[in-house]
């Protein structure tokens, strides 16, 4: 037995042994029946250590659930100039995660939570009580020289995008504008970009924004989409510019609605007018608008078409921490799961809840479940994942430490997500080491020699197993102190024979032996049958 184990064990064996003696008197220490460990539900989701594309939300169930994260854009994209997610839960905390612009939010702009947001955890709500005279916009001002709209910045490609949820679509509502000053012939003129509502469409206009290569003149441009923007429904809007051809394209919900050219001919040519930012400029978001705006971004690039569905087609995944079942060789019987799916259809939230079975739904959203186990938590990565059906019996998954994984996939249209409510691991605890067999005690002068057959399930070559010898001169106590080897219990390592010296001749001693397994902590097995011996003077 290694010395480092001995020193630690001496401090704890007395207590552990007392417990085992009590169990021996009361009955077998073998586990009886099934046990359950719960994850999620009222037990929280701190065990879901690794999360990819997964977030934790409230409101769907009494306790938080795990659900797919709605699609957001990483602030690490090189071309990202402005990124406002509105996820900060307080309007005063709204910020540009790209770090190029400062936001100022008036008190009458509200923060809508995740239940109303298109993506992420929140959205900006404007004019909930109607078109108020004093309602102010969110002001977005460049504060970095690297900002694309910094004063005097000559731009090439750009893309502006946002999600829009109008309440009314009234004529004249101002969704987004840029206002700055441009020096022209010794005077300052107003530079504007404006996106406003007219006849259920967004009208885009650019004034004194596109300048000729020679700097001698400006090209004013106006366009709108063909499709109506429907009140109380989310729509995605993109305006993007290609400086190589002069192409300006307007897309609504991923479909091209308008194409114009910032050229002298009005079609593709080399004579391209390119954007330039004026002095003292600022974006005004939601200046005269009633509704929600979410995920506003500007790129210094002509972005490619991308999916605008709410949830990424690739889905998401969680992996739990190793869950300690308490005993080596514990067997997983089954894993019970509760969860469901959620989506927003026809302007209403639709939820479905169920327990166990295959979590696969008619909209093609689904969750798939996997399990693996080991007696060593550091060896779990070397174990293969095994797929299982929640609620069904599981065979062949044994170990003290169990790890679970769940893959989440969205609906075919990307608008619905499955969610995970609770996981219950049902298992049978592993049995402690069996007692050694055929314990024999032979008395001698001031000593007793004990021998036994090895425990049937002991692995004496793994470096973690051994035997504890208990002795006492008082029946039932087993904690004597007069042996030369030390106080009871005596750790004899992997030997199955030991000579207990230093005993008092003429005294009857009581002995028991138990095997132990350190691979799973101080896992001490059942006591052997009790034997007795009386050392006597003159015995060989």
Image (spheres, helix red, strand yellow):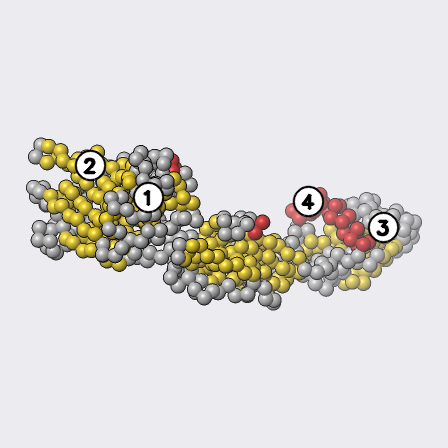
The tag on residue 290 is 1
Q: Earlier in the sequence, mark 4 or mark 2?
A: 4
| Foreground pick, 490 / 150 | 150
Residue drawn at point x = 45 percent, y = 66 percent: 362
Q: Which residue is mark 4?
A: 7
- Give how far across and how far down residue 339 sits, in percent: 52, 58
Q: Residues within 10 Å of mark 1 (few under 14, many from 20)?
A: many
Q: Is there CB contact under 8 Å for labels 4 and 2?
A: no
Q: Which residue is mark 3?
A: 476
Residue 298 seen in the current view: no
Q: SS of the residue at dot 3?
A: loop
Q: Residues within 10 Å of mark 2 (few under 14, many from 20)?
A: many
Q: From the viewer's perspective, tell me whether residue 358 is left or right of residue 492.
A: left
- Give how far across and how far down residue 199 sits, in percent: 24, 51
| Foreground pick, 20 / 538 | 20
Which residue appears farthest toward the top when viewing the image?
A: 186
Real-space Cα distance between discs 3 and 4? 26 Å
Q: Earlier in the sequence, mark 3 or mark 2?
A: 2
């Amino acid at each position: 037995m290694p010395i480092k184990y001995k020193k630690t064990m001496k401090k704890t064996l007395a207590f552990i042994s007392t417990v085992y003696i009590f169990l021996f008197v009361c009955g077998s220490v073998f586990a009886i029946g099934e046990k359950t460990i719960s994850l999620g539900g009222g037990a929280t989701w701190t065990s879901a250590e690794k999360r990819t594309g997964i977030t934790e939300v409230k409101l769907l169930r009494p306790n938080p659930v795990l659900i797919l994260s709605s699609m957001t854009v990483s602030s690490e994209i090189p071309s990202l100039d402005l990124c406002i997610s509105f996820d900060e839960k307080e309007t005063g905390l709204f910020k540009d995660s790209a770090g190029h612009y400062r936001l100022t939010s008036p008190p009458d702009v509200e923060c809508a939570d995740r239940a109303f947001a298109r993506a992420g955890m929140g959205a900006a709500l404007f004019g909930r009580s109607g078109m108020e005279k004093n309602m102010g916009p969110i002001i977005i001002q460049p504060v970095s020289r690297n900002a694309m709209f910094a004063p005097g910045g000559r731009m090439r490609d750009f893309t502006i995008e946002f999600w829009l949820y109008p309440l009314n679509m009234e004529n004249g509502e101002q969704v987004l504008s840029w206002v700055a000053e441009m020096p022209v012939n010794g005077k300052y003129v107003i530079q504007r970009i404006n996106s406003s509502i007219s006849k259920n469409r967004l009208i885009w206009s650019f004034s004194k924004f596109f300048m000729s290569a020679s700097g001698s003149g400006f090209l004013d441009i106006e366009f709108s989409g063909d499709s109506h923007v429907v009140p109380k429904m989310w729509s995605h809007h993109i305006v993007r510019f290609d400086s190589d051809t002069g192409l300006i394209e307007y897309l609504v919900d991923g479909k091209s609605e308008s194409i114009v050219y910032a050229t002298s001919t009005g079609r593709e040519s080399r004579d391209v007018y390119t954007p330039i930012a004026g002095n003292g400029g600022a974006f005004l978001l939601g200046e005269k608008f009633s509704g929600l705006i979410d995920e506003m971004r500007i790129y210094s690039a002509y972005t490619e078409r991308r999916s605008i569905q709410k949830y990424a087609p690739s889905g998401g995944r969680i992996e739990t921490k190793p869950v300690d079942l308490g005993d080596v060789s514990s067997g997983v019987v089954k894993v019970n799961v509760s969860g469901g799916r959620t989506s927003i259809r026809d302007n209403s939230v639709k939820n479905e809840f169920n327990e166990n079975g295959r979590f696969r739904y008619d909209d093609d959203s689904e969750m798939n479940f996997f399990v693996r186990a080991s007696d060593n938590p550091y060896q779990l990565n070397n174990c293969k994942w095994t797929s299982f059906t929640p609620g069904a019996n599981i065979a062949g998954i044994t170990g003290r430490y169990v790890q679970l994984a769940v893959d989440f996939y969205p609906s075919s249209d990307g608008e619905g997500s499955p969610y995970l409510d609770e996981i219950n691991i049902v298992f049978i605890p592993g049995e402690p080491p069996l007692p050694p067999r055929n314990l024999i005690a032979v008395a001698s002068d001031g000593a007793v020699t004990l021998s036994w057959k090895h425990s049937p399930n002991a692995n004496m070559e793994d470096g973690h197993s051994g035997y504890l010898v208990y002795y006492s001169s008082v029946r039932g106590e087993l904690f004597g102190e007069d042996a030369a080897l030390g106080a009871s219990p005596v750790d004899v390592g992997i030997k199955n024979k030991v000579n207990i010296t230093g005993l008092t001749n003429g005294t009857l001693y009581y002995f028991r032996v138990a095997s132990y397994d350190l691979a799973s902590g101080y896992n001490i097995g059942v006591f052997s049958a009790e034997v007795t011996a009386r050392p006597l003077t003159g015995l060989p």
